Image (cartoon, grey):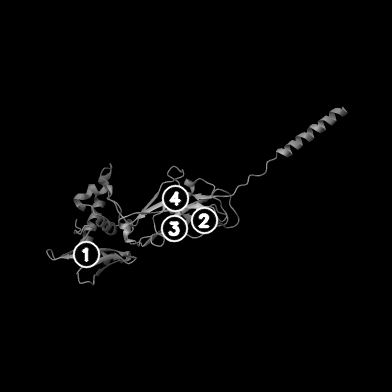
C-alpha cells in the first residue's frame, strides 16, 4: 500500500511537471497595416484605381481616400503608421499632380481601420492628353511593421483629365454628331449627366424621353451659354471676352481657370461657336 502511494505521488509529480514544461507562452507579433480594398466578392482587390477629372471639369483637385486596416488588436492609445509613394510605380510629379504625403499618419485609439486622404491635382494641362500614375504602399515605421505581402500593401491610381468615347455615343450619334473630347466635356457640363441610355438594353426605350431631354439641354447650351450661366450661377462658370482683339470668348469654371473652352465668331452665320480640339465648330 505504501509503495502504491509513493508511485502515485511520483506519477502525479511527473504529470504536473510535464504540463508546466509544455505550457506555451502567449502568441506575440508586431502589428501590421495594409490597404483594405475589397472587390464585389469581399476579396482583396489589387486592381488599379482609375480616375478622370474630365467628369468633374470644375475641380482643380480632388481627394482619393485610401482605406487601411490593422492586422492586430485595438489599442487604447493612438498609433503611428507610414504610407509612402513607390517611385517605380509613379509617373505623377509631386506638387504638380499630387500633394506630398505626410511623414506619418495617426491611427486613433481603439481603432483598427482608417482612411488616408491623398490629394490629386488638375492643374497640368497635359492631363488632357495623357494619364499619370501614383503608386503608394504601407511600409515599416511608427508602431507598425511591413511583414505582409506587397500586393496587400500596395496600390496604384491612374488619373488624367482625358475622356474616351463612351459606348453609348454610337446610339445617339445622329443627335450628337461625331465624337470629340471637348464636345464630350461640354455635354457633361450642360446636361448634368455622365451617360445616356445604351439602346442595347431590353428596357432602353423607357429612358428615351429623358435622354432626349439631356441632348436638347446640351443643344440649347451650345447656342446660348450666357443664358445657361445666368440660370446656373451655383455652378461657377463664366464667359469672358478675350482681350487680344480676336473677338473670341472663353468659357471656364472659376475654380479651374486653366481649363478653358474657346468660342469663336463666324461672320458667315453671324454667330459664335465653341471650337473643338481639331479646330472645328462644335454643333449638334
How far separated are the C-alphas under marks 1 and 4? 41 Å
Outermost residue, right side: 2
How far separated are the C-alphas under marks 3 and 1? 35 Å
Q: Secondary structure at mark 4?
A: strand
Q: Are marks 4 and 2 in contact (CB under 8 Å)?
A: no
Q: Quadrant of the N terminus?
A: top right
Q: Secondary structure at mark 1?
A: strand
User: Residue 147: percent from the left, percent from the top?
Assistant: 54, 47
Q: Earlier in the sequence, mark 3 or mark 2?
A: 2
User: Residue 180: percent from the left, percent from the top?
Assistant: 24, 54
User: Residue 110: percent from the left, percent from the top?
Assistant: 57, 54
How far separated are the C-alphas under marks 4 and 3? 12 Å
For the point 26% across and 48% down, which residue is it?
168
Q: Are marks 1 and 4 in contact (CB under 8 Å)?
A: no
Q: Residues within 10 Å of mark 2 (few under 14, many from 20)?
A: many
Outermost residue, front side: 88
| For discs 1 and 4, the disc positioned in front in the rendered view | 4
Q: Earlier in the sequence, mark 4 or mark 2?
A: 2
From this view, report whether residue 246 is shown above or below residue 23.
Answer: below
Q: Which mark is residue 118?
A: 3
For the point 26% across and 55% down, which residue is it?
181
- Residue named by callout 4: 155
Q: Residues within 10 Å of mark 4 (few under 14, many from 20)?
A: many
Outermost residue, left side: 268
How far separated are the C-alphas under marks 1 and 2? 48 Å
- Residue named by callout 2: 82
Q: For this view, does 138 lie left or right of residue 254?
A: right
Q: Quadrant of residue 98?
A: bottom left
Q: Secondary structure at mark 3?
A: strand
Q: Which mark is residue 145?
A: none
Q: Which mark is residue 263?
A: 1
Q: For this view, does 204 lie left or right of residue 27?
A: left
Amino acid at each position: 500500500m505504501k509503495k502504491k502511494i509513493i508511485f502515485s505521488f511520483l506519477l502525479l509529480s511527473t504529470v504536473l511537471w510535464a504540463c508546466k514544461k509544455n505550457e506555451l507562452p502567449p502568441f506575440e507579433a508586431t502589428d501590421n497595416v495594409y490597404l483594405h480594398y475589397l472587390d464585389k466578392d469581399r476579396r482583396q482587390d489589387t486592381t488599379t484605381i482609375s480616375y478622370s477629372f474630365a467628369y468633374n471639369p470644375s475641380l482643380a483637385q480632388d481627394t482619393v481616400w485610401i482605406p487601411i486596416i490593422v492586422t492586430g488588436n485595438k489599442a487604447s492609445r493612438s498609433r503611428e503608421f507610414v504610407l509612402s509613394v513607390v517611385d517605380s510605380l509613379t509617373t505623377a510629379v509631386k506638387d504638380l499632380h499630387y500633394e506630398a504625403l505626410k511623414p506619418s499618419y495617426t491611427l486613433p485609439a481603439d481603432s483598427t481601420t482608417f482612411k488616408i486622404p491623398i490629394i490629386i491635382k488638375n492643374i497640368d494641362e497635359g492631363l488632357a492628353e495623357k494619364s499619370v500614375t501614383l503608386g503608394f504602399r504601407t511600409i515599416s515605421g511608427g508602431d507598425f511593421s511591413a511583414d505582409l505581402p506587397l500586393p496587400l500593401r500596395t496600390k496604384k491610381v491612374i488619373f488624367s483629365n482625358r475622356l474616351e468615347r463612351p459606348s453609348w455615343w454610337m446610339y445617339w450619334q445622329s443627335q450628337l454628331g461625331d465624337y470629340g473630347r471637348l464636345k464630350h466635356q461640354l455635354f457633361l457640363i450642360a446636361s448634368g449627366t455622365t451617360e445616356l441610355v445604351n439602346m442595347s438594353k431590353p428596357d432602353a426605350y423607357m429612358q428615351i424621353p429623358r435622354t432626349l431631354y439631356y441632348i436638347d439641354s446640351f443643344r440649347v447650351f451650345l447656342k446660348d451659354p450666357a443664358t445657361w450661366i445666368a440660370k446656373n450661377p451655383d455652378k461657377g462658370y463664366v464667359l469672358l471676352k478675350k482681350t487680344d482683339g480676336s473677338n473670341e470668348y472663353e468659357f471656364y469654371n472659376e475654380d479651374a481657370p486653366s481649363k478653358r473652352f474657346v468660342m469663336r465668331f463666324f461672320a458667315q452665320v453671324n454667330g459664335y461657336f465653341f471650337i473643338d480640339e481639331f479646330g472645328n465648330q462644335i454643333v449638334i
